[in-house]
Amino acid sequence: MGKAKQLLRLGESTVLGRTIENVRGSAVVEEIVLVLGASAEAIRRRLPASLLEGLKVVVNPAYEQGMASSLRAGLSALDPQIGATLIVLADQPFVRPETLDQLAHEYRRTPVPIVIPSYKGVRGNPVLLDRSVFAEVMALEGDTGCRAIFGNHTERTVKLEVEDEGVLLDIDNQEDYARLRAGSPPHNGE
């Protein structure tokens, strides 16, 4: 894409800025761990200090090994007292704070280790993982995400239908960025 997609402009903010603002808007998030990789220093320099305030920023030196290394870095940085986490992707700036709250409420309501959002029957992100599955995620290698462990827990996974198309919208290339920027879903459900 030419530059770090996290720093692409999106309204008055950036892709990463909007994602962080949405996570901060959740009523249930106690700790935010931001894992940076390839463009870590550029991202740190370009984001306002106020946006990074209160976040635990972790630089993944092994980012070239793929997504699994970033998951390991993030999970390792979590407070050991935290029983579950939301794996929020930096390139999904349209997930509403209310959706994060819904995932957490469903987790508390049901005794399952994995809660996955879906929109109109299509599985999306972010996912909520109980600490009991962290070791499986930590054992992943390469460009593998959490989806790799879902098959081990089909009986103990909840797919939660949400009214948030943001769980399906991510920015993987210039076309995605142009499309989402042109028709940006409303910020925080406004």
Image: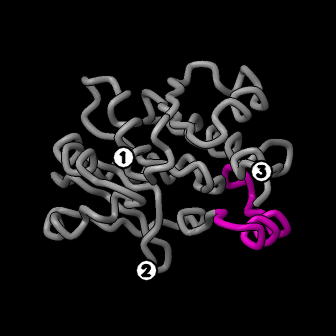
| Label tally | 3
Magenta-colored stretch includes residue 189 = yes
Task: Determine the residue positioned at 41% across, 36% down.
Answer: 74
What residue is shown with label 2?
A: 121
Rendered image quadrant of residue 115: bottom left
Q: What's drawn in magenta, residue-wise?
A: 171-190
Residue 111 point in image, percent of width and height:
15, 52
Q: Who comes first in sequence, dot 3 or dot 2?
A: 3
What residue is shown with label 3?
A: 3
Label 2 sits on a secondary structure element that is: loop
Q: Are marks 3 and 2 in contact (CB under 8 Å)?
A: no
In front of the other: label 3 or label 2?
Answer: 3
What residue is shown with label 1?
A: 104
Q: Nearer the viewer, residue 105 or 145?
A: 145
Quadrant (top left/top right/bottom left/bottom right) for the N terminus: bottom right
Label 3 sits on a secondary structure element that is: loop
Q: Report the amino acid beneath label 2.
A: Gly
Q: Are marks 2 and 1 in contact (CB under 8 Å)?
A: no
Q: Report the amino acid beneath label 3.
A: Lys
Crowding near the residue tagged with mark 1, few <14, some 14–19, many ≥20 C-alpha atoms within 10 Å: many
Q: Who comes first in sequence, dot 1 or dot 3?
A: 3
Residue 65 point in image, percent of width and height:
44, 50
Label 1 sits on a secondary structure element that is: helix
Q: Report the amino acid beneath label 1.
A: Ala
Rendered image quadrant of residue 153: bottom left
Task: Determine the residue positioned at 66% across, 40% down.
Answer: 39
